[in-house]
Image (cartoon, rainbow, N blue to C red):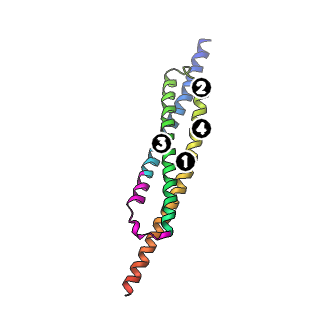
Amino acid sequence: MSTNKTLAVEETAAVWQNLFRDTERRTSELQFYSDEITFLKNLLDRYPLWLMEEESLATLQVVSASLKKTEESCKTLIFSNNSTRDRLGLLIENPFAQDEYKIKSDFRSDGDKLESLTVDMKSVKTEIFKLVEQCFRTEKARKLIGNQK
C-alpha cells in the first residue's frame, strides 16, 4: 500500500511539474507580448504624426485604444499566470496541499486567455503596420511630387 501511495504522489508531482513548465513557457510568451506592446506604443507615440492624413488620425485613435486594451489584458494575464505558476511550485513540493480542481481550472483559463491575447495581438499589430505603411506611402508620394517640381 505504501508503494502505491508513493507512486500516486510521484505521478501527481510529475503532473504539477509539467503544468509548471507550461506556465514558465507562458511567462516567456507573455513577456514577449509585453515587450511588443511597448514597441508598438512607442511606434505610435513617436512616429511623426504630421505625415498622417485626417482619415488616418481616426484610425490611429481606434488602434491606440485597441492596443491599450490588449496591454491591460496582457498585464492581467501575466499576474494570473504568475499566481498559477507559484501555486504549482508549491504543489510540486506538496502534491496534495491545495485544491487540484481550482488550479487546473485556473491553468486552463489562463491558456484560453493567452489564445485570445494572441489573436488580439496579431490584429492590433496588423492594424498598426497598415497605418505605418500608409504613412510611408503618403510620405513617398509627397517626395515624388516634390522631386517633380
Give the labeled residue for mark 3.
Answer: 75
Name which residue lies at 41% across and 83% down.
145
| Residue 125 appears anywhere in the view | no
Q: Nearer the viewer, residue 117 or 20?
A: 117
Q: Is disc 2 placed on a helix, strand or loop? A: helix
Name which residue lies at 57% across and 17% down.
6
| The magenta stretch spans residue 69 | no
**Residue 129, how many percent across, how many down?**
48, 63
Q: Kindly identify which numbered label has been placed on residue 109.
A: 4
How far is disc 3 from disc 2 in space, using C-alphas?
25 Å
Q: Are marks 1 and 2 in contact (CB under 8 Å)?
A: no
Give the labeled residue for mark 2.
Answer: 100
- Residue 10 falls in which quadrant of the image? top right
How far is disc 4 from disc 3 in space, using C-alphas?
15 Å
Task: Indicate the amino acid at tag 1.
Answer: Leu
Q: Which residues are magenta?
A: 38-54
Q: Earlier in the sequence, mark 2 or mark 4?
A: 2
Q: Earlier in the sequence, mark 1 or mark 2?
A: 2
Query: Taking 118 as reference, is 105 above or below it?
Result: above
How far is disc 1 from disc 2 in space, using C-alphas?
26 Å
